[in-house]
Amino acid sequence: MPKSADDAHLSRRRFLAAGAKSLAGAMVSAPLLSLAGVAGTPLVADASGKRPLQTLKLQLDWVKDVEMAGVWYAMTQGFYRDEGIELAVSPGGPNIDPVTLVASGSADVGVVGNSASIVQARSKGIPVRAIGAQFQQLLGCYFALKSSGIKSPKDFRGKRLGTQIPYLYDTLYLLQWAKIPQSDVKIVPIPSNDVTPLLDHKVDAMTGWVTEQVQEVKNLGHEVNVMMFSEYGFDFYANALLVNDQALHTKKALFARFLRATRKGWLYARTHPKQVTELTVRKYGTGLEFKQQYQEMVDQDPYMISEATRAHGLFWMTPYIWERGQHILKQFHQISRTVPVQDLFTDEVLVQSLKA
């Protein structure tokens, strides 16, 4: 999450588009294995001189902050090198699309804030799929000042809904869930990362991320009611890890080792949030503020856990979420066709990463 002076009014969500195209026109969005035989992956010398390391390029969708805290801890502790990996992490930003970079082979693994991005790409024939998901549900939500009395989408009738364009189909979904016609609300386009329309009472509720805009309003001393998209069946993963099909075939062992080291980093980070936040702010991030990053670290943690991860481990995915998400995108004209769920994700890498 950007915290430098230059980035103060930028939100990663503005550029991620929540994995969706704008609907503005509709309104009047394993163990260590041998490195031999893995094609296209450069080798570099291990600093210890014991063996070569296999380079893996990780492309983020936004800046280096606590959303990747487990990665930073794993890098510091040498977990990737223990797995024979030299990890190279590239930050994201306004003009960087991890899907495109992974599809072209410019990056080995990409991070996307909404798994809808993968569904949309696959529906267009772009050969990418997920190998894991950091957050088991979206961190996106609607929120309102507590004084408004809005506690549920059922309270939206007659209200002004501040909607960032990428969240438009999220809004239409919630209206459908609440059985409220679009004509019974006023949808007001608002800038990303700008909470002033809500605070100035120009809108009655607005979209945002629970770890970002919601926290900003709370930090200003306001009580809020939060309505998570996922609470109403809007099912997608967040910070999904994607690879392209060719790399999945040739580098599966590499990706399994990457996931194993990353999981190890997160297992520590989740139980030592203050220490890992300090590490992130001091060594990896630029212009980050500790208090905000620490709060984000704490707030995001519950979203890494689900019944699936309790049963199988961090980053686990299930077919239902992908099937459900694809259905939603098709319903709201975000994709023109559906594809087999096995083309959207694979659990083969996760399974291999869990082997002793």
Image (spheres, rainbow, N blue to C red):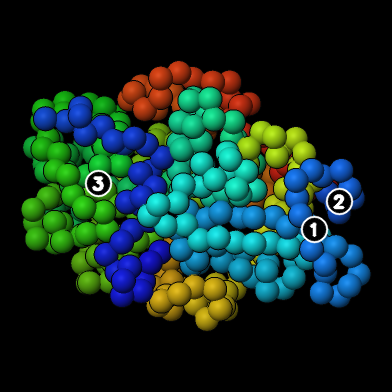
SS of the residue at dot 2? loop
For label 1, the crowd category at 10 Å Cα-Cα, with few meaning under 14, some 14 to 19 and many 20 or more, is: some
Residue 153 or residue 100, whichever sits in front: 100
Q: Which mark is residue 11?
A: none
Mark 1–mark 2 contact, CB under 8 Å? yes
SS of the residue at dot 3? loop
Residue at the far top: name it.
337
Of mark 3 and mark 1, the one earlier in the sequence is 1
Asked if residue 82 can be seen in this view, the reply is: no
Task: Residue at 49%, 73% (x, y): give it.
Answer: 285
The x and y percentages for residue 315 are 62, 48
Q: Is residue 103 left or right of residue 209?
A: right
Which residue is labeled 1 in the image?
43
The x and y percentages for residue 111 are 54, 50
Question: Can you say whether 160 is above or below 5 in the image?
Answer: above
Task: Residue at 49%, 20% (x, y): give it.
Answer: 338
